[in-house]
Image (cartoon, grey):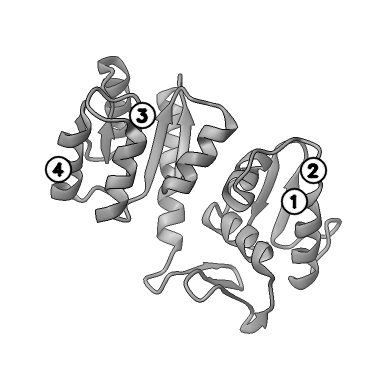
Amino acid sequence: MFVVEDDQHIREMAMRALADAGHTVRAEPSAMAALQGIVDHRPDIVILDLGLPDLDGGDLLRMIRAVSNVPVMIATARDDDSEIVRLLDAGADEYVVKPFSGAELGARVRALLRRAEASTDDGSIVVGGITIDLRARTVELDGETVVCNRKEFDLLACLATHAGEVVSRETIYAEVWREPYNGADKTIDVHLSWLRRKLGETAAEPHYLHTVRGVGVKLVEPT
């Protein structure tokens, strides 16, 4: 793990929480030193603050993406939807809003690691009988091709990269539609309905796609 955070209290709290969970942790308080450390040590995850003394964290994120595909979690006090969308577009994989606890950080790190492990070497994600090829943008269910339109595929891929987690509608809109969720739009529900039909299930009898009322949606292996 690599923590990039200039606030000493937050940096030490994050390092302690991750070390207690069994991770090897390195940290830097500035962007350029962090970039060199990330290149040298090839961490499993980077936890990146935005308000760094020598460079904005968003600029550092783009520099990291130029040299590495390491999962990056943004740790920020900037909690507006447009900022979250900007960071996801720039290559962030996850974000946590300050102030956060060590327990929350640990849970988000575990979820991000699960998502990274679910992705196979050929760029595919497998959840139960579903295989999603992220590079070819194809979907198979029990070996049979499932024809998805662009947004259906993007929605399924979004949920698959968060497999086992409840993904909020705000996050889905940010990652799939690249815009803030207004709370009333039924676009997600419509696309979920189309996906369920293609996966041979319904909202009343879900196998893979489960709606958690008032929270979001999760993709899980059928029990």
Label 3 residue SS = loop
User: At 61% from the left edge and 53% from the top edge, which residue is drawn?
Assistant: 176
Tag 4 or tag 1, which sits nearer the N-term? 4
Look at mark 1 in the image and give the residue it sits on.
188
> Disc 3 residue type?
Leu
Q: Nearer the viewer, residue 133 or 66?
A: 66
Identify the residue at horizontal 69%, vertical 70% (top origin).
149
> How far is the residue under mark 2 from the one under mark 1?
8 Å
N-term mark: 4 or 3: 4
Density class for disc 3 (Cα within 10 Å; few <14, some 14-19, many ≥20) is many
Whole-number angstrom distance, CA of label 4 to CA of label 3? 17 Å
The spot of residue 109 in percent (x, y) is: 41, 41
Front: mark 1 or 3: 3
Q: Which residue is mark 3?
A: 50
Q: Is residue 172 above or below residue 10?
A: below
Type of amino acid at the residue the image marks with label 1 = Ile
> Spatial distance from mark 4 to mark 2, Cα to Cα?
43 Å
Q: Which residue is mark 4?
A: 36
